[in-house]
Amino acid sequence: MPIKNYILPTASMRAMVQQLRSQLRVLAMLAGLTLASCSRQPAQVVAKVEPASAALSVAPAFTSGQLQAQPAQNWLTSGGSLANQRFSPLSAINKSNITQVKAEWQTHLNSGLGPQHSGQGEPIVYDGIIYQVTGQNDVFAISVDTGAILWKYTAGLDPAGVTVCCGWAVRGLSLGDGKVFVPRLDAHLIALDQLTGAVVWDTEVADPKAGYSITGAPRYYNGKLYAGVAGGEYQTRGSMQAFDAKTGAHLWTFNTVPGPGEFGHDTWPADNDAWKYGGAPIWQTSAIDPELETIYFSTGNASPDLNGNIRKGDNLFTVSILALDVNTGQYRWHFQETRHDIWDYDASSPVVLFDVEKDGVMRKGLSQISKSGYLFLLDRVTGAGLTPIVDTKVPQEPEQFTAATQPIPQGDAMINHCIDKVPDGWTLVNKGCTYTPYGRKPALYAPLAGSNWMPPSFDPRSGNLFVCASESIGGAVMQNFGNKDLGVQTGQMIYGGAFQLPRGTERHSYQVAVDVRTHKIVWKFESTVGCSAGSTATAGDLLMIGRSNGKLMAYDSSNGQQLWSFQLDAPPIPSPVVFEHKGKQKILVFAAGSLFAGGGKSDSLWLLSLDGTLPEAEKAVSAAPPPSINNAGDPAPKAPELALPADPVNLARGKEIYGSICMTCHGESGQGGHAEGAPIPKDASIEHIFTTATRGGQKMAPFGAAFTAAELKSVATYVKESVLTK
């Protein structure tokens, strides 16, 4: 039977119980047992076992002060603290000695290596133990001292029960009250025993068959757990939900698309049920201000994506920042970044809270940068602009019911918001500037994805926010779409249009430091490998960030000067984690790669420090670059096309693979999607598509090792007969 935590009258008695639990855990592991039974998903106990002296200790019900503090000895929560600042106050590793840093150990987790998996999970660290989730949703406890795996939880997700728009990606865990809290891509929220990895409770948050999932790390606070529900383009209705951390019992729900009688419902049509499938997913981890007792988060695009024809109105609370009472879920304020979104301008990057002095007054601020590329700086007490934001008239497309104005921040722009070079074969409307509308005739606009899910970081000493943003050319066309196309949540991706992406256009990405008091750029440089990873700032005047070439980089946070790099075996996508262990500063990175980052895949945790002796990896596992709009998608020139295998075609399997792997890059019609994949030529043969999928293209990873020839033949046939006919 499980050993439970009881409230004991003295600290000494609590210590005795904790010691007993640790000893029992070690004995159980040595015996090949676990301390809990009747688990829906039993933990795997690996053969490599730590000695009793290094046994796990139970995390308490952390106080708001512990979770609000800047992380030092531990990294207790996603984002480093409740404010999501990803800032470490440690300075033992700094810009004067960063070049001496090497790896202490590298540990392979043997999970998340499939083509659909992305290693976006930010580690958490408590009392010498690392807790890590992979893109396969498996969870590990790892020793800081040795890199040994202490236990493993195997999620065992059924691919048929996972409906996610953009690959399998879970962005972190949460810890507290002796439990590890895990978001699952099948829309389950589970609690694992921190000592053994055994399931304590399992709550289904939403119906995965209807297209729901959870990608952001849940937020643990004051005995509750807060999780946002995602869904992308699956006819879903987003929500923020709260649960009892001890039992998993549901406490409250705030729907991010308001229903009848709720504030904001009048921003949806009264003559149809579009609000029931209106989108506004939550992709990231929330932030909390304990003093204001407020939880903050941002939402994604409206649904149906790319088509506003049947959802007249501003469509609250899509592409918005929301503030709720953290205890009750009651609405406090909102700020909509893009009204009536038709451009896929999700606000998918996490909000960051900060306190700064502005005009002689201390202000409680909040930042969020969306795929529009605009950085919004708000007063988090009121939701008003901390720096000026002006409602600006924008061009109209009547059939799309576009909003008359959009809120435009007046500070320095992170990127160029217009197209300065006309792609071949296109005529620009409105110079292709942000919020250029389109109808049944395609139009180009910039950017396609200015700043995506990647977490920024914030240095409270300087007031500088560090973001990565990209200039890219997007385009879309609205398609015939009506009420008949909605009505049942089937878990099928649905668009009201199609991306139309030009070939041969350039993409420029920039790392930017912005003073949040003035909205002025402090420094900016172009990143030659794009924006694909989160960043972390430190009191050692360092800004650390992973790159798609597999390198962990360190820059001088005061001026952006590159100081150091360390080659890993795959791109480190989550923000680096910085903490102190036994008096020594450590840097922890999860180098697993991503479906979109390029640079290959792996399953590695790396621990680095001034005491490290291990050399760099020779190179990333694969040099395959990320999907790009200037990717023709063709195999190498003069390479003969491969012969199709004799196996029968399984169109259902082909559809499944295309939906989970290919659609994010190539879109519903094969002409381009979220990740800016190249258009698939309409006249491409099945043999040509099969060859490209097997070998890869100029900027497309090969999938010949990930799927059988029969599966790739099925995908190619499905693309030719179903995708390219749309």
Image (cartoon, helix red, strand yellow):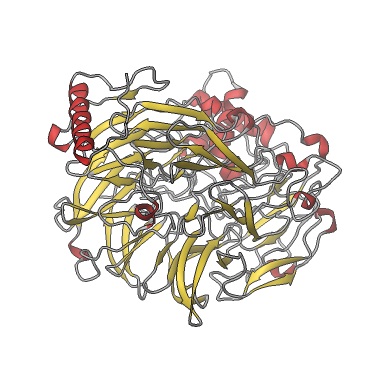
Residue 21: x %, y % from top left? 22, 29
Percent of width and height locating residue 643: 52, 28
Horizontal relation, residue 547 to residue 467: left or right: left
User: Residue 711 or 465: which is nearer the viewer?
Assistant: 465
With 170 as the anchor, is 544 left or right in this view? left
Question: Residue 201's x, y, as percent?
Answer: 44, 27
Residue at x 53%, y 59% (from the top left corner):
451
Using residue 35 as the reference point, say whether residue 279 is left or right of it.
Answer: right
Residue 705 visible, this orientation: no
Looking at the picture, tell me which residue is in the foreground, 450 or 51: 51
Residue nearest the observer in this picture, 455 or 703: 455
Name the residue furthest right.
271
Taking the spot 74% from the left edge, 69% from the top edge, the residue there is: 430
Q: Where, quadrant-wise, is the N terminus in this rendering?
A: top left
Residue at far bottom of view: 360
Instruction: Say which residue appears at 42% left-offset and 71% top-offset.
Output: 464
Provide residue 639's location: percent of width, then percent of height: 48, 41
Q: Is residue 46 visible?
A: yes
Q: Quadrant of residue 84?
A: bottom left
* Left or right for 300, reference 114: right
In the rendered view, tell whether residue 334 sits above or below residue 684: below
Q: Quadrant of the C terminus?
A: top right
Question: In this figure, what is the number of numbered marks?
Answer: 0
> Which residue occupies 71% across, 40% down?
277
Q: Is residue 19 above or below residue 678?
A: above
Q: Going by the picture, which residue comes out furthest to the front?
A: 9
